[in-house]
Amino acid sequence: MKEIIIRTNFNKKIGLGHFFRCLYLQKLLTKKNFLVTFIIDNNIATRLTKNLNIINFGNKKFNSFKDAKNTYEAIKNKNISLIIIDDYRIDYKWESFFKKKGFKLAVIDDLANRKHSCDYLIDSGWYGFDKNNLRYNKLVGKKTIKLLGPKYKIINPKLKKIKTTKKIFFIYFGGGSYFLKYRKLIFYLIEELNKIKLKSVKVNLVISDLLKLKKSFSYKNIKVKVINNSYNLYNIINNTYLYIGANSSIVNELSYLNIPRILISVNKNQNIDISHYQELGNYFYIGYKKKINHKLFSDLVITIIKNYKRVKDLHKRKKINIDKNGSGRIVKKLIENL
């Protein structure tokens, strides 16, 4: 059986986004009769890796050269058809090491801040009609096949477009430790929502299973449920009234479902040109801020609630649409010449 290697990682700092999108690709590749093996490096015990083929280098200080050698030693006797890389730490030297040994590489990137030596470059981001196809022209070779734009978005295949009349807020600041940074803002907002006395209001506060928090909080007018499971969110997303939180990969799924959202970049690499982001229906984007005024932020959320129908209609008129076929398009391209 032909084998595909996925080199990625997850931890408290970077969260789970990279791992999730690789997991969706893994499921499709397995259906195409490929054996898929993940290579990671952490000591985190989690249900995420259950029933997967895993090679774990352990939680050592990352060194690109050593990691390339360790990876090669782990796979040199296998029948490897392709290596998929979704890890910002992997650099041009790492990739070149494997290219020189005859391996095919596919790199998932969204930073466009470094050169790549690869056969496929995947970036599903949107940077405007004039820039989207130009970002990697000087960063990859002429023979590199570029899979660019929202048609290659990797989203959860279990998502369904359903109508909900419930006011369920989804608050999520990523699968890492960013929740701790925004904790005061989150609970200030919940207290302000409690004051306006909305009917049948629930808040799903999702944090990583890598963090610990009590399971629920009681308010007079709001029920807050804490969910320590950031890798099984499709039921929560499907029933969401308003999303508030990190500008992470989950935004793709919200966009697909036309769910209104207020986005904050929890990391500098998530910062986006707002004019282009609006074309995807992301109209309420805070960007990356070291400090956020709690009252102004809460006022924005309450204003959106009071004008919800208009906001919902606005999201339906976005210029760029996302569907659930991005993963399939990627897999089709990757395996057509294997």
Image (tube, rainbow, N blue to C red):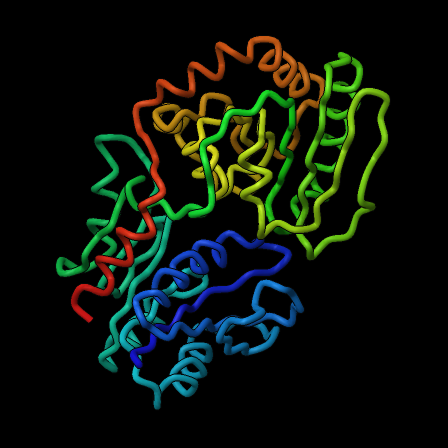
- Quarter-wise, where is residue 149 in the image? top left
Residue 161 versus residue 23: which sits nearer the camera?
161
Q: Position of residue 266 (x, y in %)?
A: 57, 40
**Is 284 positioned to the left or the right of 60 in the image?**
left
Q: Position of residue 109 (x, y in %)?
A: 36, 53
Residue 304 versus residue 24: which sits nearer the camera?
24
Q: Position of residue 211 (x, y in %)?
A: 73, 53
Query: Which residue occupies the extreme bottom position in the image?
Result: 77
Please state the total of marks drawn on the protein image: 0
Name the image quarter holding the N terminus: bottom left
- In this rendering, the answer to whether 216 lies above or below 29 is above
Residue drawn at the location 73% of the way across and 14% of the way down: 198
Residue drawn at the location 63% of the way across and 33% of the way down: 170
- In this rendering, the answer to whether 248 lies above or below 306 is below
- In this rendering, the answer to whether 140 lies above or below 2 is above
Residue drawn at the location 49% of the way across and 59% of the way down: 19
Residue drawn at the location 77% of the way across and 52% of the way down: 212
Name the image quarter holding the C terminus: bottom left
- In this rendering, the answer to whether 140 lies above or below 299 is below
- Quarter-wise, where is residue 300 in the image? top right
**Is 11 positioned to the left or the right of 92 in the image?**
right
Q: Position of residue 125 (x, y in %)?
A: 35, 41
**Is 122 positioned to the left or the right of 166 in the image?**
left
Residue 237 versus residue 130: which sits nearer the camera?
237
